[in-house]
Image: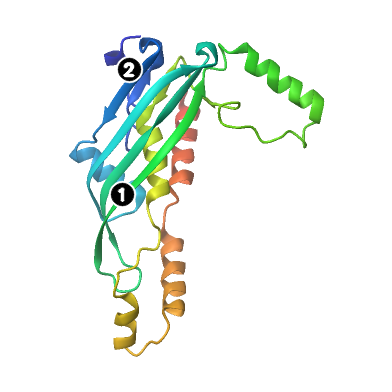
Amino acid sequence: MPPNKLRKNKNIPLSHPFDTNEMGAQKHVIIRPDEDELEKLSAFLDVKKITSAKGSFHLSRANGGNIVKVKGNVSAEITQECVVTLQELENTVGEDFEAYYTDYSQAVPFSAAKKSLFSKYGMSDIPVLDEEEDPEPMKNGVIDLGEVMLQFLSLGVDPYPHAANADEYLKEHGIQSADSVQEERSRKVDKGRKNPFEALRALKKDVDNEK
């Protein structure tokens, strides 16, 4: 399947499918979301604005080619609101990451290995495997690098950003401790905040139900 024939997943705010069948031994991919994608991304991550974002991905084959290793970095220039003063804060977030993927329909050895673990340890005693030993699934060799970027950007966003003058601001208004204010604001933020991972899982579930 040629890369330009891949269909984007319109149910997530950032979708960049990549066909690993076309990459050979390794491939380097750069993603720079456009203005429309940045707007959708900022809404999904619950920040006021994302000025720019970039994802750098190095894909290579491991375990005889059955596993695709994705190593890279994601970063973004974001604007958030201080949970104490409500003033806007500009920040740069970034995450280095390493992830592994395989097409389980084509990787019989992994199924056999898991059956062996079930037999050896039983259902409740299977040891936690490293990502390389228990890779994420991909279908027909396709990895949505936009989704990968979305997941790791979510990890880099501070859910409770504070301005440098937050404590001073509170004292000026007769409040000696920021703890009670932060707890109250955090409670309100949590109540209305969308969890990016839960939202992403819900979107993927909707897509699966449509198939």
Going by the numbered disc 2, the residue's amino acid type is Leu
Q: Which of the 4 image quarters holds residue 122?
A: top right
Circle 2 Cα neighbour tier, 10 Å, few/some/many (<14 / 14–19 / ≥20): few
Instruction: Say which residue label 2 marks.
Output: 6
Mark 1 element type: helix
Residue that appears at 29% across and 74% down = 85
> Does residue 138 appear to the left or right of 86 in the view shown?
right
Q: In the rendered structure, find residue 183 and report the number of the disc placed on it.
A: none
Q: Residue at x 48, y 39 (%)?
A: 201
Can the viewer see residue 84 in this picture? Answer: yes
Q: Position of residue 7 (x, y in %)?
A: 33, 20
42 or 58, nearer to the observer: 58
Q: Is residue 170 left or right of residue 61?
A: left
Q: Amino acid at mark 1?
A: Ala
Q: Are marks 2 and 1 in contact (CB under 8 Å)?
A: no
Which corner quadrant holds the N terminus?
top left
Label 2, secondary structure: give it: loop
Q: Is residue 147 above or below residue 27?
A: below
Measuring 50% from the left and 27% from the top, which residue is drawn there?
100
155 or 35, which lies in front? 155
Residue positioned 40% across, 40% down in the render? 96
Q: Residues within 10 Å of mark 1 (few under 14, many from 20)?
A: some
Image position of 175 with respect to 193: above or below = below
Question: Label 2 to label 1, Cα distance in Å?
Answer: 25 Å
Residue located beneath label 1 in the image: 43
